[in-house]
């Protein structure tokens, strides 16, 4: 969730809202999820957040139970 918080902090409020909408959710839901810290996004939302952040929000950072962290080479 920390990576999502960091990514959102790089965006203006209008950009945050647009990012959330492109991802199929609302900025209010994302903010609440970050503040509560116990929300478990479904896989489709995680994929959308990853895609629309151009990889800045890694899949494994939101659902490590589904996606493993990349391994070093």
Image (tube, rainbow, N blue to C red):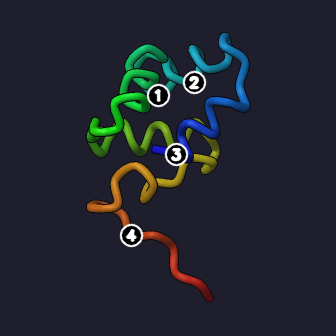
Q: Mark 3 points at which residue?
A: 2
Give the label, 1 or 4, closer to the camera.
4
> Marks 1/2: CA distance?
6 Å
Q: Earlier in the sequence, mark 4 or mark 2?
A: 2
Quadrant in the picture for the N terminus = top left
Disc 3 secondary structure class:
helix
> Marks 1/4: CA distance?
21 Å
Mark 1 Cα shell of 10 Å, populated few (<14), some (14-19), many (≥20):
many
CB within 8 Å, label 1 to label 2: yes
Number of numbered markers: 4
Quarter of the rendering containing residue 37: top left
Q: Which residue is drawn at 57% across and 24% down?
A: 19
> Marks 4/2: CA distance?
24 Å
Identify the mark at residue 46; answer none if there is no mark. none
- Residue furthest to the bottom: 73
Q: Mark 1 points at which residue?
A: 23
CB within 8 Å, label 4 to label 2: no
> Marks 3/1: CA distance?
18 Å
Q: Is residue 15 left or right of residue 44?
A: right
Q: In this view, does 38 lie above or below 64?
A: above
Q: In this view, does 71 lie to the left or right of 6?
A: left
Q: Name the residue under label 2.
A: 19
Q: Which of marks 1 and 4 is nearer the N terminus?
A: 1
Q: In this view, does 10 lie above or below 27?
A: below
Q: Which residue is drawn at 72% across and 18% down?
A: 12
Q: Which of marks 2 and 3 is nearer the N terminus?
A: 3
């Amino acid at each position: 969730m920390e990576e999502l918080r960091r990514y959102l902090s790089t965006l203006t409020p209008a950009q945050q809202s647009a990012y959330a909408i492109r991802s199929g959710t609302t900025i209010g839901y994302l903010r609440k999820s970050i503040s509560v810290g116990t929300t478990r996004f479904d896989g489709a939302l995680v994929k959308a957040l990853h895609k629309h952040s151009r990889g800045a929000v890694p899949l494994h950072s939101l659902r490590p139970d589904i996606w493993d962290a990349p391994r070093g080479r």
